[in-house]
Amino acid sequence: MLSEGQVNEIIIEIENAPSGVQSHSSSNQTSQEKTLVDSSFSIASSISDIDARDSQIFSKRNDKKGNWLLPFSTSLNESLSQTLHSPECMGVDTPCTSYETIQAQKLIASLIPMTSRDRIKAIRNQPRTMEEKRTLRKIVDKEKSKQSHRILELDCCAQCLNSVLRAYRRSKNSLSEFLSYISPWQKTLKVIGGKFGTSVLSYFNFLRWLLKFNIFSFIVNFSFIVIPQLTVAERNTLQFTGWEILTGTDYFRDTVMFYGFYTNSTIQHGSSGAAYNMQLAYIFTIGVSFVICFFSLLFSMAKYFRNNFINPHIYSRGIAKLIFCWDFTVTHERAVKLKQKNLSTEIRENLSEICQENAKSTFSQQLTRFSAHMATLIVSTGVAIACCVAVYYLAEHNSEFLRKHPNHGAVLLLPFLVSCINLAVPRFYSMFGLVERYETPRHEVYIVLIRNIFLKISIIGILCYYWLNIVALSGEECWETLIGQEIYRLLLMDFVFSLADSFLGEFLRRIIGMQFITSLGLQEFDIARNVLELIYAQTLVWIGIFFCPLLPFIQMIALFIMFYAKNISLMMNFQPPSKAWRASQMMTFFIFLLFFPSFTGVLCTLAITIWRLKPSADCGPFRGLPFFINTIYSWIDTLSKRPTYLWVVWIYRNLIGSVHFFFILTLIVLIITYLYWQIIEGRKIMIRLLHEQIINEGKDKMFLIEKLIKLQDVEKRANPSSLILEGREMEQKGPLHLGEHDAMPDLRFRRSVQEDNSKV
Amino acid sequence: MGNKQTVFTPEQLEAYQDNPFRQRIAQVFSEDGDGHMTLDNFLDMFSVMSETAPRDLKAYYAFKIYDFNDDDYICAWDLEQTLTKLTRGELSAEEVSLVCEKVLDEADGDHDGRLSLEDFQNMILRAPDFLSTFHIRI
C-alpha cells in the first residue's frame, strides 16, 4: 500500500539522520517514531472525517467524548524532543506535529473541567495504549493542579467531600473485585462458554443470577424470622419418617419450615431484654424482601432494555451481524471448527432467504399459512385450558381422595400430574413446528416462548385460585401450612423431574441419536425451555415464601444441584448450537417475563392473601386476627399513642392510606411518561433525518469525486508530460489525497455494481 | 528497573486459543504491527476485550481487526478476507462476493462502497450481542 511505502521512506530518513544517537534504546525510539508517524498518518487521513462526525448520536449521555482517533499527547512529543536532540528528525513530522499539538491541547483542555469520574470515563474510552492513557492522566492532573493553585483553596468541607467520594469509589472498586472473586463457578462458566458459546452460557448466567436472589431472600428470612422463632421453639413431638423430604407433612409440619409453627407473641428474653414482635417481624421481613426483589428486578430489566433494545424499524435481516459478531469466547478447537461450519450453513440459508423474500407469496399460500397459524393457536389454547381444567378437577377432589387413600403416595398425585403436564405439553407444542411455517426465525422463538409461558402461568394461576378461594375458606385447621406444603411438594417434584430429565432423558436421547437413528445426531441445548422451567420454579418460590419461609433455602440447594447436573449433562449429551441465538435480546425478554407475568402475579396473590383472607384461628403468627393486614392497623394504633412516632402515623394516614395521594402520583407519572414518549418520537424523526443527510452527503462526495476525476482526465490528456511530476506531488501531499485516490477504484466498482443492479 | 520486555510471539499466542482472527488480534494490539506483543500490549488487549469495556472502544478495535489492509475503511476485499477466515473457505467465490455485497448494502450508510468507522458503529448498535461476543474470558 502506498501509505506503508510512505512510512518506510520516512523511517529510512530518520535512521540515517541522527548518527549521534547510538544508544541501545534507539530501536525503542525508532519504534516510537514509527508509531508516531503511523498514528499521525492515520489521524491525517481521518481529519476530514473528524469534523463530519456527530458523536452525539452514538455516545451515551454521560460520555463527553470529543474526538475519536486522537493524536499523541504532548508529553510523548516532549520526551521525544528531549531524547533525540536533533531538529532534522522533528522537522520531518513538523507539519503533522502542529496538528497533533493542537488536537492534544484541545483534548487536555476538554478533560480538565470534567469531574474526576467523567474524566476517568473519558480517558478510559480513548482507543490508546495504557501507557498513553497513563501519561494523559498525569498531564491532565498536573494541569489541573496548576490551575487549582490559582483558585482559592477549597474550604475543608469540599476537601472532606472529595476525600469521602474518593474513599467511596475505592471501596466500591474493591467490593466489586471481592464479589467477582467469590462469584461461584467462574471457571466452569469459562469452559462452557469455550465449548458451546455465549448463548448456552446465558442460561447458566441466568441460573446464577436467580441463585443470588434466593440467597438474599434466605438470609433475610433466616435472620429476621427463623432465628427469633428458634429461640422460643417448642419441642417437636412428631416422628420423623423418610417421606417428609418429599411430602413435607408429619415431622416438618411442626418445624420452622411452615407458617403454622410461628408464634404470634412478642418474644422477650428476660425482663429487660428487647421485645421482638413476631407478627410485625413476619410481615415486614417478607414485605421488605419483596420490595428489594422488585427494585432489583426493575433495575436489571431497565439496564438490559437500555443496552439491548433494538428499534424494530431499523432491524435488518442480519447477515452483517453474522459476519461481525463472531463469538470470541469460543476457545475449544473442535468447537471453533464446528462453529465455522455452522456459520457457513447459516450464511447460505440467509442468502437463500434473502433471494427468496423478493418473491411474493401468492394469496393461497398466505391463506394456508394464516389458517395453519389459527389452527395451532386454537389447539394450543385448547390444550392449555384442558390441562388447567384437569388440574382444578383433581385439586378439588383431592381432599376426598386423600381421605379414602391415606398413604403418602396419594399426596404426591397432584404434583406428579402437574410436572407431567409441564414435561409433555411443551414437547407437544414443539411438534407444531412441523406444520407451521414462520416468517422469521425470531417469530418462531417468540411464539414458542409465549405458548409455553401461557401454559405454565395458567397452571399456576389455577392452583392459586384453588388455594386462595377454596383451601383458605374451607375452614381447615391450618390452611396456610397446607398451602405451604402443597407448594413445597410442587417444587420438589419439579426438581426431581428436571433431574430425571437431565440424567435419564437426555442420556437416552444421546444413545438413540448416536446408535440407533444416527441421522438425528446429538441434540442441541434448548435454552428457551430450560429458562422457562427456571422461571416457573422461581414463581413457585415467590408465592410460597409467605407460607413456607424456608423455601428460598430449598430452592438454593435445588439450583446448586441443577447447575452441576445440567453442566454434566451438557458436556456429555449435547452438541454446540447450530444457529445463531440472539442471547442479549433473549435475556432481556426472559427477565421481562420474570418480571411481568411472574413477579407481578406473585404480588397480586400476596396482596389478595394479606388484604382479603382470614388467618387461621389457632396457628401461625397472625392467629385470631380478622385479616392479615390488621397487624399493621393495630401497630399504627399503638404508635399513635406514643408522641415520638406521630410522624409515622401521619405518613401512614395521609400518604399511604389516602386515595388523593395515589391519584396525584399516578397523574404525575402519566404526564412524565407522555413527555418521554414524545421525546422518543422526536428523536426517531431526528434519526431518520440524519440518516437521509448521511446518504445525501455520500452522494455529494461521489458527485464531487466524479467531477475531480473528469477534470484530472482532461488535464492528463492536455499535458501528458506533467503526469510523472503530478504523481510525485500527489505522493508527498499527504494521505488525504491518498485516501481519496484509494477510494476511487472502489467507488467506480461500487457505482458499476449499482448500475448493474438498477438495470436488473 | 531494566528495560527488559517480555515479548509474546504469535506462536505462543496461538497456543492460547483457536480463534480465526488470532493473527489479526495480535497485529492490531502489538506496538509494531507485526504481531509481537509486549506485556503492555497484552494487557491492553485483555482490557479492551474484557466484559466491562465500553461499547465504542470495543467497536473501534473490532473495526481495526476486520480492517485487513489498515486503510481505516472496511472495503470489499477486507470483507472477503473476514469471510474466508470465518468459514474456512467453505463458501464458493460467488457466494462470498454475494455476501460482501449484501453486507455493504445493509451497513454502508453513506454509500461510498466501503464501511467507515461510523457505519460500523451504527451497525453494531443494532447488534446488542456484540458486547458479549467480543469478549475473551480470563
Image: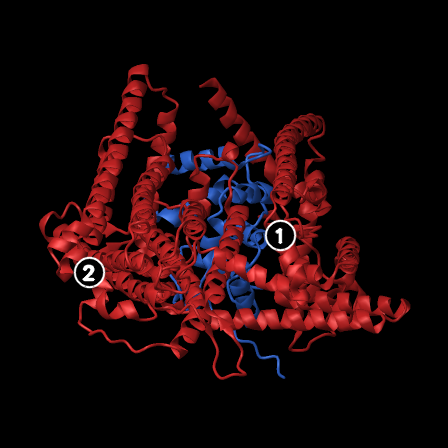
Chain colours: A red, B blue
Quick one: which residue is furthest to the top in this view?
A: A363
Are the numbered discs 1 and 2 placed on the same chain, yes or no?
yes
Q: Is residue A592 above or below residue A140?
A: above
Q: Chain of mark 1?
A: A
In x, y percent, where is residue A547? Answer: 36, 60
Q: Nearer the viewer, mark 1 or mark 2?
A: 1
In x, y percent, where is residue A333? Answer: 32, 60
In x, y percent, where is residue B8? Answer: 48, 70
- The residue located at (42%, 36%) in the rendering is B99
Dividing the image into 4 quarters, which one contains the C terminus of chain A?
Answer: top left
Q: Please name whichever residue, A501 or A552, is drawn nearer the observer in this view of the structure.
A: A552
Q: Is residue A327 left or right of residue A337?
A: right
Residue on which disc 2 sits: A503
- The residue located at (17%, 72%) in the rendering is A241
Residue B92: in sight, yes or no? no
Q: Quote the CA–CA distance across marks 1 and 2.
A: 56 Å
Give the class, few, some or many, for how many residues have Cα within 10 Å of label 1's Cα (few <14, many ≥20).
Answer: few
Q: Please name whichever residue, A718 or A157, is drawn nearer the observer in this view of the structure.
A: A157
Q: Is residue A62 left or right of residue A630?
A: right
Q: Please name whichever residue, A470 or A370, is drawn nearer the observer in this view of the structure.
A: A470
Residue on which disc 1 sits: A653
- The residue located at (73%, 69%) in the rendering is A138
